[in-house]
Structure formats: C-alpha cells, structure tokens
Amino acid sequence: LADIDVPDATSVQVECEAAGAPKGSVVVQRCDCRVEADVRAARDAAYAAFGAVHLLMNNAAMQSNNRCGPYEHPDRWKVILDTNLLGVYHGGLAFAPSMVEQAEPSVIVNTGSKQGITMPAGDTAYNVSKAGVKVLTEALQHQLRSMDGCRVNAFLLVPGCVNTMIRTRGDKWVEGAAFKPDRAKDEREYNGVVDRAYAAEKWRERGAWQPDQVIDELFGAIAAGTPFYVICADGETTRAMDDGRMQWAMDDLVF
C-alpha cells in the first residue's frame, strides 16, 4: 500500500489483517505519486518484500468536485494533473520494465473515469487528467502487446458513481478551514454519522456502487483477459446509458 497518507494506509493494513491477511503480507510505504523518486522507492520496497510484483494498481487521484474550470485555479490544476496523470505515468515508469522482465503473468491497472471519456462540464482539470490516463493506458497496452513473449497485461478501470473517500478529500482540500466535517459523505461516514453501513446505504440510495462491486468487475475482466476497458455500471446508470453517452461524445467529432 503506497500512499501519501501513512495513517490512512495503516488503517487499511489493519483492516486487511482483520479480514484474514497474514501478518507481514500487507506492507505500507509512504509515497507521493507526484514524485518519481518516491514511486521508485515504493517499487524497491515491494520487490524487497515480495520478490515480484504481479498486480500494480495506479489509483491515486484528486478532484475539486466541479470547482476547477478552464483557466481557473492554476494551483488546483497542477495538483490534479500531477497526481492523476503524472502519478499514473510514474507508476508505469517505475514498475512496468521490472514486471516485463519477471516474465510471469502480471497486470497493470490504471484507474480512469467516465469523465475522461464523456467530459461533462464543471471539473475540467479532472476530465483532462482522466482523458490523459485513458490515452496513456491505451498506449501502454499497445506497447505490451507488441513485445514478443510479454506476459504483462494492462487494463483501464472506468468506475461510475462509487462510494469512496475522494469527494470528502476534495472538499477538505478546496475548502480548507471552511470545511464542515458534518458534511462529509464517503465510505466511512455520511453527514456526521460515522458508520460504514449507514454511509453505504445512503450511497446506495443515491445510485452509487460499493467499492467491492467495482473490484469484482475488475477481477472478472482480469481473469478473462478482457475487456481492456473495464467500464462499470452503477445503481443509476446502465451500460446502455453509458454507451449512449460515449457515442454522443464521439458523434460530436464525426457529424
């Protein structure tokens, strides 16, 4: 678990061990994905602990929750692009050559977003960053498939509405001291009620998937080796609706 927030990563480590992971099988490494040296250090720590890496998931992201339009807030733009796009680039730069050299079945997953495909108005910096992740992952998979004997496969994970921490962290980042904790809406609490089950139910009412549903979708694709684009539905958006929105975006170029 490579994360800039060590206490939070450590809490996940504790959860994993409580769920049955053997002691020592979950390692926490402080890592700022915006810093290439940090990501290389995370790679070295992973190989030192396990001898090989068979699954890399580049998942770190920041968003401003629709408060970063074109040519606004250059400080927010830099954080979002450095985290969401360069962070993924640094992950591949550090890990991919070593994973290829292992010559063992391995997987690289980059987390994109539907916003990186359909580009809804409001959070332009986030959209740009996730569009970049899509292009980068497509190029990575093409390169891997062009290498004789390569046993590494890449996937672009494209979640829908999911109950995670990203919205609360985005609000805290943008609002700073003005953030009101009783407005937090994430996987751990909802409007001041610190209870995972309550938060999960409130998010279900809003049509969100739970994180484990997204992971089940991803692991199904990994097991099958396809599709490359792991596009997840959610409680309010069907795959047919997603297809229509993506087709609409492409039709803007064609017609």
Image (cartoon, rainbow, N blue to C red):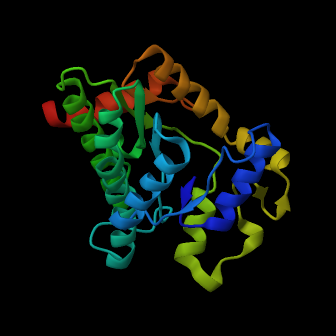
Residue 80: quarter of image: bottom left
Q: Position of residue 59 (x, y in %)?
A: 48, 49
For residue 106, side relative to residue 200 (left or right): left
| x 40%, y 43%: residue | 112
Residue 33: quarter of image: bottom left
| x 71%, y 76%: residue | 180
Q: Position of residue 226 (x, y in %)?
A: 40, 18
For residue 170, side relative to residue 145 (left or right): right
Question: Is residue 207 shown to the viewer in this render?
Answer: no
Q: Position of residue 79 (x, y in %)?
A: 39, 70
Vertical order, 81 against 116 (above or below): below
Question: Is residue 107 shown to the viewer in this render?
Answer: yes
The quarter in which the C terminus is drawn is top left
- Residue furthest to the bottom: 177
Vertical order, 240 against 175 (above or below): above
| x 46%, y 57%: residue | 42
| x 58%, y 69%: residue | 171
| Nearer to us in this view, 121 or 105 | 105
Vertical order, 39 against 101 (above or below): below
- Residue furthest to the top: 224
For residue 27, side relative to residue 87 (left or right): right
- Residue furthest to the left: 254
**How many numbered marks are there?**
0
Residue 165: quarter of image: bottom right
| Nearer to us in this view, 45 or 33 | 45
For residue 254, side relative to residue 188 (left or right): left
